Image (cartoon, rainbow, N blue to C red):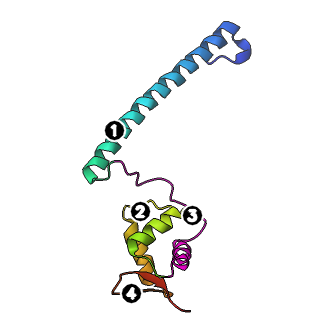
Amino acid sequence: MEQTLESMSLSEIKQILRNRENQVESLKRRRDKLTAQLQEVEEEIASLEGTMGVERRGVRARNEKSLNEHVQEALKKSKKGLTLNELSEAVKAAGYQSNSLNFKNVLYQNLYNATNISRDENSGKYTLSAS
């Protein structure tokens, strides 16, 4: 039969609390060891997948303005137009953040699908089309 708190002595209650604190500490140490093991496994997987040093999970980059808005602002500043490389650097310099492994491809897709942006085949530069 289990005792009630009222029927227990102070020393018995303290012993129960110490036992529980010890159990909690033991579980925390176990959790820390398992976390370290999991991290090792994650790093091994990442190295085998070729994504070492690149965090693929986590928070998506949030930008105040869309990529298209950044592109249009950069192109407005350059009357002669910008190449894909120049545009990529300008957009990033303006504060656009991306977790993409290949940002230039993302940018190219944006340019390709934009109706108000054209590309000069001779120079390879993108400019805003007359709207």
The vertical placement of 45 against 15, above or below, is below
Q: Is residue 59 magenta?
A: yes
Residue at position x 38%, y 51% in the image:
54
* Foreground residue among 52 and 37: 52
Earlier residue among tags 4 and 3: 3
Earlier residue among tags 2 and 3: 3
Residue at position x 44%, y 80% in the image:
111
How far apart, in angstroms, are the residues tagged by discs 1 and 4? 49 Å
How far apart, in angstroms, are the residues tagged by discs 2 and 1? 24 Å
Name the quarter where the C terminus is drawn. bottom right
The secondary element bearing badge 1 is classed as: helix
Q: Are marks 1 and 4 in contact (CB under 8 Å)?
A: no
Q: Which mark is drawn over residue 40?
A: 1
The vertical placement of 95 against 17, above or below, is below
Residue at position x 46%, y 80% in the image:
81
Q: Which mark is drawn over residue 100?
A: 2
* Foreground residue among 50 and 79: 79
Q: Are marks 2 and 4 in contact (CB under 8 Å)?
A: no
Mark 2 or mark 1: which is in front? 2
Residue with the mark numbered 4: 120
Which residues, given as a range, are shown in magenta? 53-79
Residue at position x 35%, y 35% in the image:
37
How far apart, in angstroms, are the residues tagged by discs 2 and 4? 26 Å
* Foreground residue among 46 and 119: 119
Few, some or many residues within 10 Å of mark 4 (<14, 14–19, 20+) = few
Q: Of the residues shown, which amino acid type is indicated by label 4?
A: Asp
* Foreground residue among 64 and 72: 72
Mark 1 or mark 3: which is in front? 3
Q: Are marks 1 and 3 in contact (CB under 8 Å)?
A: no
The secondary element bearing badge 2 is classed as: loop
The secondary element bearing badge 3 is classed as: loop
